[in-house]
Amino acid sequence: MFKNTISNLGRIRQVVEVLVRYGFEDVVTNTTLRRLVPQKRRLSWQHAERPVFETTRWERIRMVIEELGPTFIKLAQALSNRPDLLPEPLIDEFQKLQSDVPPFDVQMAKQIIEQELGRPISEVFTEFDDVPLGSASIGQVHRARLLTGEAVVIKVQRPDVQEKVRTDLNLLHELVRLTAGFLRNQGLSNPQDIVDAFERSMMKELDYTSEARSMEQFRKLYESYTTFYIPKPYREFSTAKILIIEFVSGCKISDKQQLLAWGLSPEKVAETGMDIYLTQIFEFGIFHADPHPGNVLVRPDGTLVLIDFGMVGKLTKQQKYAFAGVFIGMARQDARSMALNFRRLALTADIPDMRAFEADLTDLIEDFTMLDVKEMSMSDLADRLQIIIYDYKLQVPGAVFLILRALVILEGIGKVLHPSFNTFEFVRPYGARIIAEQYSTENILSEAQYTGTQLLALIQTLPTDIRQIMRKISRGDLRVRVELSGYQLLMRKADQLVSRTIIALLAVAFLLFSGLSLLGHYTADMPYYRGMPVITWWGFSITSFLLLVLLILGTRKRKE
């Protein structure tokens, strides 16, 4: 731990100075970070020639994230999909963050491709476009053509990006360790868990083979569909740092003019797109989690194409049933059913007042059932649901927020193409279908078989477990481990108090020794100084030193 702190010291100091510059001195002064920034650096809080305190605290948090770089931006973007963890104003600011960065040198891109392929580019591609199609914080994309004639795109990872991301991840762990108490006081109960989950997500994103596997999984699920297509990944040429994908041409799904020029019905395209997404969510339980218009293309024949599978969400069967139950409960105006399904959906749902929870859901239902179909908005519903989840501290799967976000994006696309587009009308039959699936004979038998298997395993292991416990009790080896949390500060204070008490007692002891030494009868060999034995002067000196130590400790405490 100490080694990590030292290795990250320069970067930590930079983070601290950025925090101070944007007026977050309380984050610094209330944590051990205060030791890493000089006092004079806390005074010039300006941003773009404007005092930072003229902006809101949420805006300043976004400014800090922007200045700290791509890894922090990606963390904030990931948290923007977690309204159960952050307040709505901060979510709004994080959604403004953009991680687009300028492309890196094409020669460097070619060098990385050749290193990964283990051979020159000319032995794999007949064409290679030096101008990238797009660029982001992790990598960039180039068009090319294989020797076999297929048009492809190549995703190339930025040089040294893995090392940079790992350094920043280590830094995030260190910052959370140093500021954990402050973050918990601000309502963020599990900051270390958040960083751990983000680390897993980032390491997965840094491995392009994971994206290739997701694409192959979707291709297999939709191999019989004629209205939906997933580009083919070329696994034989792809590695962790480069990904070769079939090039697919088409227009953005939001390009209504081009759709009309091709003789396609924009309304039909919108309906097809929504049906495909709801199939992913409610039938397969795995879905493309970033359906912005640039990632959803339409071919001239009306086929929809999904690209960029770097972000994929998953739901278990039980989560899928619970999520559908929330919508079904709302359609039936049954707040109790909504509440029960929310509890089933949540990873942990310690709701102290279920009546208040049901009352808030009743208000939500009444507000939306009174609206005309044209007035209903998935965006408004998602916002209200997210506020309820945040207020009641429900820890629901992150995939739920990805679904809500995807539905909001799709609704925005749908309203561009389809004037009377209504997301609820599409969701309702899928929800009913899921409920029917949940109570089907096949699913009930499957659940009964699973429960029976678990019960049988318990019965088989119970005698052995009881025998082991009884043996430990008879030998006196049974131990109970109790873990306490939140006591670190108390222990540190107690340790400081004990240390100072010991120093004070030693000072008193040496002072008494010095006084008593004046009453002693010494031989002629005892040296004297100014009429007192030298041993007395030594006693006074040690006492003075101990008192000085106590004074320094007290002064430092007041400064801290």
Image (cartoon, rainbow, N blue to C red):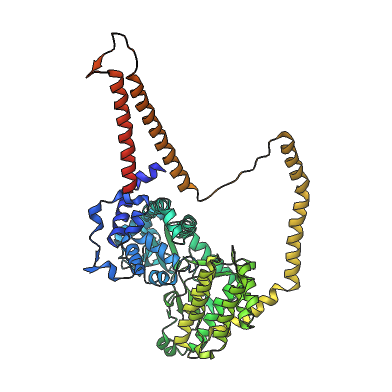
Whether residue 391 is visible to the viewer of this picture, yes or no, is yes
Whether residue 430 is visible to the viewer of this picture, yes or no, is no
**Residue occupying the far front of the picture:** 519
In the foreground, 143 or 101: 101
> 39 left or right of 197?
left
> 126 left or right of 382?
left
The N terminus sits in image quarter: top left
- Residue 177 vertical position relative to residue 305 in the rendered view, above or below: above
Where does the image place residue 439, in percent across and percent down from the top left?
A: 72, 73
In the foreground, 319 or 555: 555
- Residue 213 vertical position relative to residue 360 in the rendered view, above or below: above
Where does the image place residue 427, in percent across and percent down from the top left?
A: 58, 81
> 172 left or right of 529?
right
Where does the image place residue 496, in percent across and percent down from the top left?
A: 41, 41
In the foreground, 253 or 312: 312
Q: Quadrant of residue 216?
A: bottom right
Where does the image place residue 454, in percent across and percent down from the top left?
A: 73, 56
Tally the numbered discs: 0
Instruction: Name the residue at 62% across, 83% down.
Output: 331
In the foreground, 507 or 279: 507
**Residue occupying the far top of the picture:** 524
Instruction: Name the residue at 45% across, 78% down.
Output: 297
- Residue 69 vertical position relative to residue 492 in the rendered view, above or below: below
Q: Quadrant of residue 14?
A: bottom left
- Residue 412 vertical position relative to residue 127 in the rendered view, above or below: below
